[in-house]
Amino acid sequence: MGITHLLEDFGPATIVPAASFPEVSEEVMEEERAVSFEKGYSAGWDDAVTAKDKESAHISATLTSSLEDLNFTYKEAQSQLIESLDPMFKVLTSAVLPDAMAATFGHHIVDQMTDMARTHTDDPMTIFVAPGEGSAVRSLLPDSFATPVQVQEDEGLTPGQAYLRAGNSEREINSSGLVESIQDSIDAFTYHIREESQYG
């Protein structure tokens, strides 16, 4: 027994006559293939160029964005560094440097006077200091100084300031002016960095 009774019958089989196509010569077929190949090749080439252009544009945009982020990160890090160093600079110029200059002020005077004595051995030397600093400077002068040295307090001088005179030669020592100059330089530097990071 077969299984035909289980399958649906779609009716009698009809035979479709073969369509008649016009005869195409081998040369025309070759020419059509060449044209089709050329069209496909051109379309593929155009797609590849378009994809390459899109990829290049994407890479350029990504690189530009990365460089901008990197530049911003550098500027931000620099700004944060300056902001964190600024209090240290202020303490340095307002407390540490003045104390260090005050502690070594007399020694600077003696060093400068010793240097001046080398060229002015016969001339008397005078040191002009601010009121209240004369005794401290006198105590630092060596007993065996080659030329006589006179220390005078001058009302026109401020603490940390001194004038040295040997003959016609004069020198100025201005510790407080040096500290102010350093402070002004640091303030200008931090201001410049802040402006640059803020406005580019």
Image (cartoon, rainbow, N blue to C red):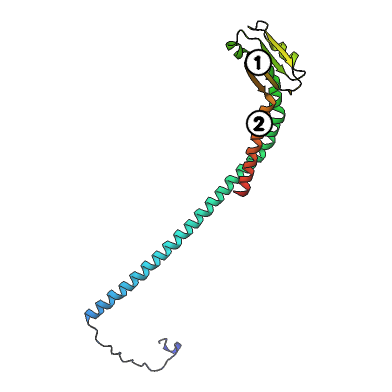
Which of the two marks, 2 or 1, is nearer to us in this view?
A: 1
Depth check: 78 or 146 in front?
A: 146
Residue name at image x 71 percent, y 14 percent? 137
> Mark 2 near mark 1, Cβ–Cβ under 8 Å?
no
Q: CA distance from mark 2 to mark 1?
A: 24 Å
Q: Farthest front residue? A: 168
Q: Quadrant of the N terminus?
A: bottom left
Residue position marked by numbered label 1 in the rendering:
165
Residue position marked by numbered label 2 in the rendering:
181
Give how far across and how far down residue 160 sits, in percent. 71, 22
- Element class at badge 1: strand
Q: Residues within 10 Å of mark 1 (few under 14, many from 20)?
A: some
Depth check: 165 or 103 in front?
A: 165
| Three-letter code for the amino acid on which mark 1 is drawn | Arg
Give how far across and how far down residue 181 sits, in percent. 66, 31
Q: Is residue 145 above or below residue 22?
A: above
